[in-house]
Image (spheres, rainbow, N blue to C red):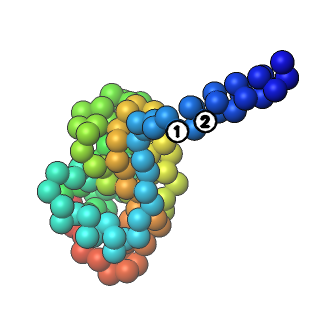
Amino acid sequence: MKKVSIILSFLVLLVFSCTEQVEGEIKVVSPEEMQTLLQLDNVQLVDVRTSKEYNSGYIALAQNIDFMSPTFDIDIQTLDKAKPVLLYCQKGGRSAKCAEKMIDLGFKKIYDMQGGFSKWEHEGLPYKKK
């Protein structure tokens, strides 16, 4: 009986470990990789900083969805969950939290820029100011 129980446990473990789960994916990328990803067609670039931070400098074509805003959960769902989302904040903390939240909301592919806008700016990559 014990042998049957062990075999049954093994089979259950095998079935569940081989089952492919459809979940979202977060990939942390460098500013250089982010710049390359921006050349792709159907990507969505999101700056999750405050509007004051955004207005002081932002990556071209980024839409500002403030992670700290009380309407963030509603605002972020205006994005297409099937299209890749490129995220950045000032240094990387807020965008990492945002990426996790977006996975929970059903987004499929998220790229989080390591070091945030500070690193983008420090590396001399192009940006705009309002």
| Nearer the observer, 4 or 88 | 4
Q: Position of residue 79 (x, y in %)?
A: 25, 38
Q: Secondary structure at mark 1?
A: helix
Q: Position of residue 101 (x, y in %)?
A: 46, 37
Question: Residue at point 52% right, 38% down?
Answer: 18
| Nearer the observer, 122 or 52 | 122
Label 1: how many Cα within 10 Å (few below 14, some 14–19, many 20+): few
Any part of residue 64 in sight: yes
Residue with the mark numbered 1: 18
| Image-based side of 5 in relation to 105, left or right | right
Vertical arrangement, residue 126 with respect to residue 12, above or below:
below
Question: Residue at point 43% right, 51% down?
Answer: 26
Label 2: how many Cα within 10 Å (few below 14, some 14–19, many 20+): few
Q: CA distance from mark 2 to mark 1?
A: 6 Å
Name which quarter of the figure residue 83 lies in.
Answer: top left
The C terminus: image quadrant: bottom left
Tags 2 and 1 touching, CB below 8 Å: yes
Question: Residue at point 37% right, 33% down?
Answer: 106
Amino acid type for the residue under numbered disc 1: Cys
Q: Position of residue 57 (x, y in %)?
A: 29, 64
The N terminus: image quadrant: top right
| Nearer the observer, 7 or 60 | 7
| Nearer the observer, 106 or 68 | 106
Q: Position of residue 43 (x, y in %)?
A: 22, 52
Any part of residue 116 in sight: no
Question: Residue at point 32% right, 54% down?
Answer: 86
Identify the residue at the far right of this view: 2
Q: Secondary structure at mark 2?
A: helix
Amino acid type for the residue under numbered disc 2: Leu
Residue with the mark numbered 2: 14
